[in-house]
Image (cartoon, grey):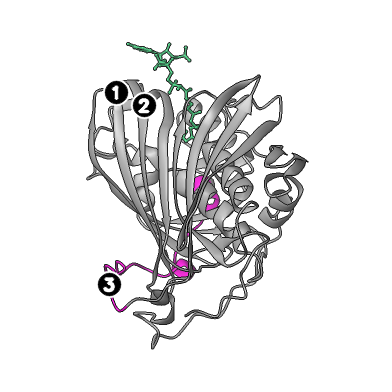
Amino acid sequence: MVETGMKGVGGSVCPSPVGNKSPNSGAEKSPEEPKVQFKQDLKSVLVTSVLNLEELDVDLYRGTHHWVPRTQRLFGGQIVGQALVAAAKSVNDNLYAHSLHCYFVRAGDPKVPVLYQVERTRNGRSFTVRSVKAIQHGQPILICQASFQMIQPSPLEHQFTMPVVPQPEDLSTVEELIRIHLSKPDLAEKLRQGLNKLLANEVPIEIKPVQPKLFSNFFKAVPKKLFWVRARGYIGEGNMKLHCCVAAYVSDYAFLDTALLPSPKYRAQFSASLDHAMWFHTTFRSDEWMLYECESPWAGGCRGLVQGRLWRRDGVLAVSCSQEGVLRVKLSKL
Ligand SMILES: CC(C)(COP(=O)(O)OP(=O)(O)OC[C@H]1O[C@@H](n2cnc3c(N)ncnc32)[C@H](O)[C@@H]1OP(=O)(O)O)[C@@H](O)C(=O)NCCC(=O)NCCSC(=O)CC(=O)O
């Protein structure tokens, strides 16, 4: 059993025995890089908004927002993270979240807080299930089921092997890549404006694309992409709930557009995640680099299906994710 020191208040993420056996455990771990100071680090963002749900009554919480995407609808990852926090508050400390399944049924309104209503669906011997409704203006915006389990080691263990990719120290951040583009004198004005908007966008996560070319979406490619990702700022080991929130953030960010990679002549006119599922396999630190491996096995009917794996740097598969989203596209002018 993994010694986590990561129990949050009222439940945490499932620390499976796989966490003890790192496939690359013999590999040299790169020394931690000094972290760049940003205006806001994710820890303060999460502590002051995402994680800090206000308890209004038994199993009823209120959450506020920090970062709102350009679409002016609430970021799905934030709603999922908050729903998981609300669910975890109603389970015993010896239970760990191992999966969640959500539907985004209405756009979230960034002008008002979100209420989270928890239903204690079942307390089992090994597994415990909670249903959470996220509500705004009296109507659900998200419905979520989260399942928790006692730690139960088993002889049955396997995982895929992490892809071999360049290390994050050898790659550039999205911001650095954008600045390189912006330095090109022949850059189309519309593209320049778009890139400047992206730079101004203070997303509290840091990304280093493994295939930087794919991030510009102008090249036809197989629907697969890889990037290193971590929270901005230091979170530390102590609170697995924080790490789950960040995993929810990360897993919903730049995920759905994997389905656009084979069709660069189109750009999304309207896109939004319809559902989102996550499976937490073991403990992880979201403020340390994790490799996000995203692929889209299918798109059609104005929808795209994406699947993702978040790998710990030592090669342990930490989280698996799936999402279907609506993708209404139009021909790109660029
Ligand atoms: C998915 C839904 C929009 C489905 O609702 P509806 O069925 O009523 O909506 P709809 O599909 O008919 O319309 C959605 C938009 O598409 C347009 N539309 C509809 N039919 C169309 C057609 N045939 N051709 C072109 N456009 C069309 C509508 O005008 C509208 O745009 P317009 O609105 O411009 O008039 C809704 O359930 C919803 O908003 N759920 C929440 C999704 C969400 O917020 N996910 C988390 C954030 S996304 C995220 O975090 C990740 C990410 O972004 O990648």
**Residue furthest bottom in the image:** 26
Q: Earlier in the sequence, mark 3 or mark 2?
A: 3
The residues colored magenta run 155-178
**Residue 240 x, y percent position in the rendering:** 60, 63
Is residue 175 a member of the stretch shown in magenta? yes
Q: Which residue is found at the position 57% from the left and 62% from the top?
A: 12
The residue pinned by badge 3 equals 158
Write down which quadrant ligand 1 falls in.
Answer: top left
The residue pinned by badge 2 equals 326
Q: Quadrant of residue 270?
A: top left
**Residue 9 x, y percent position in the rendering:** 68, 61
| Separation of marks 1 and 2 at Cα, in angstroms | 6 Å
Name the foreground residue: 136 vs 28. 136
Question: CB atoms at circles 1 and 2 under 8 Å apart?
Answer: yes
State whether residue 32 appears in this view.
yes
Give the secondary structure at mark 3. Answer: loop
Type of residue at label 2? Answer: Val
| Separation of marks 3 and 2 at Cα, in angstroms | 33 Å
Q: Is mark 1 within 8 Å of ligand 1?
A: yes
Is residue 26 a member of the stretch shown in magenta? no
Type of residue at label 3? Answer: His
The residue pinned by badge 1 equals 302
